[in-house]
Image: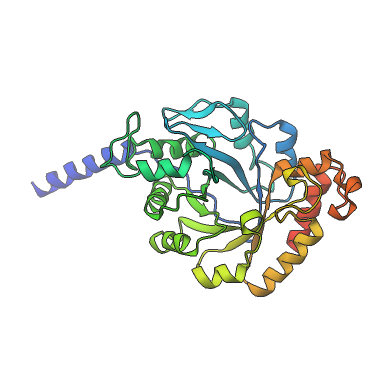
Amino acid sequence: MKAFFLFVCLAASSLFCSAQKTYAPAAALPAKNLAMFARGSYPGDDKTYQLLKQSGFTTLLLSSFYIHADGDLYSGDSRQPIVHNGKWVGDSAYVKRVRNLKKKSSISRIEILLEGRWYGQPPNTFDFIRDWYDDSKSVPGIVTGTGEQSTLYNICRVLKEVLGADAFCIDDESVYDSPSIIAMGKIAARLNMHMTLCPFKGYTYWQDILKASDAKVVDALYLQCYDGGVRNEIKDWVEALKPTQPIYPIFMVRGSFSTCGSYKGSKSVAEIRAQLKGFKQDYPAMSGAAIWQMADVYNFVEMGCAVKEPTSGTARSATEFLGQLKTGLKSEL
């Protein structure tokens, strides 16, 4: 009788497990992580993606993506949703390009940048994550909570299943509701994904997320060192947060905001290298850095910044610019 009961239990367990969706593990962080934020790459073109594959950068953060009030996910480069009712409805060529990114490539990790509203913008991404993560709340047209039927879970599931994303990155600059982002980290864990953080201010908010999260899931921070974070010193963040996860500074290149000059903290390759050298002295454990953003790499070249503003740099092509950035970052890490 006991043997029969055990058999029934094991059989039921097997059926239950087989019914669950299993997801491939997410890619770990490279030992030396050179990350590129890739705004302007949806749907992109084959030439750009091949350029990124040969760039020497190791992580690509596809950016930026916004959640709308109806539960759809939009790319910042498109006026049409890419995820609707828990299904991919975006560009199929983009899917192919992203899925091929790691093949014969320096890119080993793909992240999705979830971006929120700036000052004066209508509610989006993090407003809705805050409003929807609690399943005790009722929101018309939205399945609240973080369960497998929920709107938030299914947005993340599509990013994992369709694009093969390893992580989503939290760029919250307005809402700062830590319980909802902690809940998003738990969604990431169930999907075998990672979650990274992208702060420019607010030690306490980011610290609360780190304290309540599994460090194997929330595995890195990208620190904005431009615009609102232009005065950020990496040593201050290390001291304030005391993270076990690595902190990677993000630098904004010349060509940003359609100018070859220095604006809101944009820097030439030489200026990036000099600041990174100082950061490494203050934070010897630093093992990577990031560039904001691919669209501005193209802007620099298209505006002829090497001629128009010689102090901004010498690159005459996107390939040359990416090569200079890679070399400059690696030399100081």
Query: Could you tell me which quadrant the C terminus lies in?
Result: bottom right
Vertical order, 107 against 42 (above or below): below
x and y, in percent, of residue 201 in the image: 54, 60
* Residue occupying the point 13% across, 45% down: 5
Left or right: where 48 falls relative to 110:
right
Across and down, in percent, residue 103 comes to 65, 41
Between 302 and 315, the one nearer to me in the picture:
302
Residue at the limit of the structure toward the left, as seen here: 1
Tag count:
0
* Residue, far front: 120
What sort of colour scheme is used for the picture? rainbow
Q: Position of residue 311 (x, y in %)?
A: 87, 55
The quadrant holding residue 102 is top right
Q: Please give left or right for residue 59 compared with residue 131 in the image.
A: right
**How far across and how far down the image is residue 52, in percent?**
71, 43
Residue at x-position 73% and y-position 46%: 256
Is any part of residue 52 visible from this angle? no
Q: Which residue is rendered at x = 22% and y = 40% of the image?
A: 12
Question: Looking at this view, is 101 or 236 the one in front?
Answer: 236
Res 296 quadrant in image: top right
Most foreground residue, 226 or 320: 226
* One can see residue 125 in this view: yes
- Image: 162 above or below 242: above
Is 309 or 169 nearer to us in this picture?
Answer: 309
Residue ID at (50%, 61%): 202
